[in-house]
Amino acid sequence: MWLAVIALGVLAGASGLLLGFAAVRFKVEGDPIVDKIDAILPQTQCGQCGFAGCRPYAEAIAAAEADINQCPPGGENGIIALAELLGRDPKPLNPENGVEKPKMLAVIDEQNCIGCTLCIQACPVDAILGAAKHMHTVIAKECTGCELCVAPCPVDCIHMTPIAQTIATWKWTYPIAETAVKPPVAEVAA
């Protein structure tokens, strides 16, 4: 009996070592450009670009399956940052995907909420808290302003309100790169 236990222990140890070696030796690295593109995108997960979220859109940009001008929440600054990263020319935002708007926050009129949970199911970042047949509310710090919760609400109790610019909500914008090439300044010989 002890011989069987020892044999199984040695077999398990050898298998563990083999799997550990294989995990290190054959590790598949993610595409670093996808990670860089994803870091530039605003992470609203709104789907306005035609993809299920920001990561699939970043993968499509890296594979040259999507253009860099399909993200309305990222706006012009996001397009310019993507163009600089990828070495492409900036383009205006594609109007088919929407227009650039200020950052918004979903607000639920709790007096009119019937607790249908359709908004909870639609929210891609789980920013809505509530239960069936009970009032719902939005977790402001989690809400990305994607507006996906507005359409499914049967009583129209969800409204998007712009986030006021305060010290807590202000963000430094990406510097806008000058797209025009300036001619070099000729030095004047004195």
Image (tube, rainbow, N blue to C red):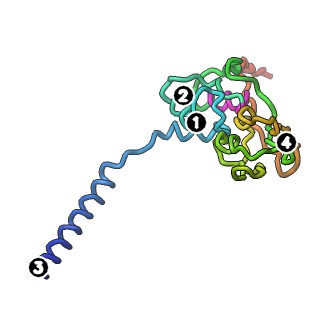
Task: Kindly identify which numbered label has been placed on residue 163.
Answer: 4
Q: Name the residue under label 2.
A: 61
Residue at numbered disc 3: 3
Q: How far apart are marks 2 and 1 (CA)?
A: 8 Å
Residue 123, given in percent of the width and then of the height, sits at: 67, 42
**Quadrant of the snapshot with the N terminus:** bottom left
Disc nearer the start of the sequence (4/1): 1
Give the overall secondary structure of the magenta segment. Answer: helix
Q: Residues within 10 Å of mark 1 (few under 14, many from 20)?
A: many
- Tell me, yes or no, whether the two marked residues, 2 and 1, touch with CB atoms within 8 Å: yes
**Residue 181 seen by the camera:** no
Q: Earlier in the sequence, mark 2 or mark 1?
A: 1
Decide: is 87 above or below 37: above
Q: Where is residue 50 in the image (x, y as percent from the top left)?
A: 60, 26
* CA distance for labels 4 and 2: 29 Å
Q: What residue type is labelled 2?
A: Ile
* Circle nearer the viewer, 3 or 4: 3
Of callouts 3 and 1, which one flags the residue occurring earlier in the amino acid sequence? 3
Q: Which amino acid does label 3 sit on?
A: Leu
- Magenta-highlighted residues: 73-83
Quarter of the figure with the C terminus: top right
Q: Which of marks 3 and 1 is in front?
A: 3
Query: Dot 3: what SS?
Result: helix
The alpha-carbon separation of the residues under discs 2 and 3 comes to: 58 Å
Q: Is residue 74 above or below residue 27?
A: above
Residue 35 counted in the magenta span: no
**Reading the chain from its start, which is encountered first: label 3 or label 4?**
3
Residue type at numbered disc 1: Ile
Query: In the rendered image, which residue does mark 1 sit on?
Result: 37
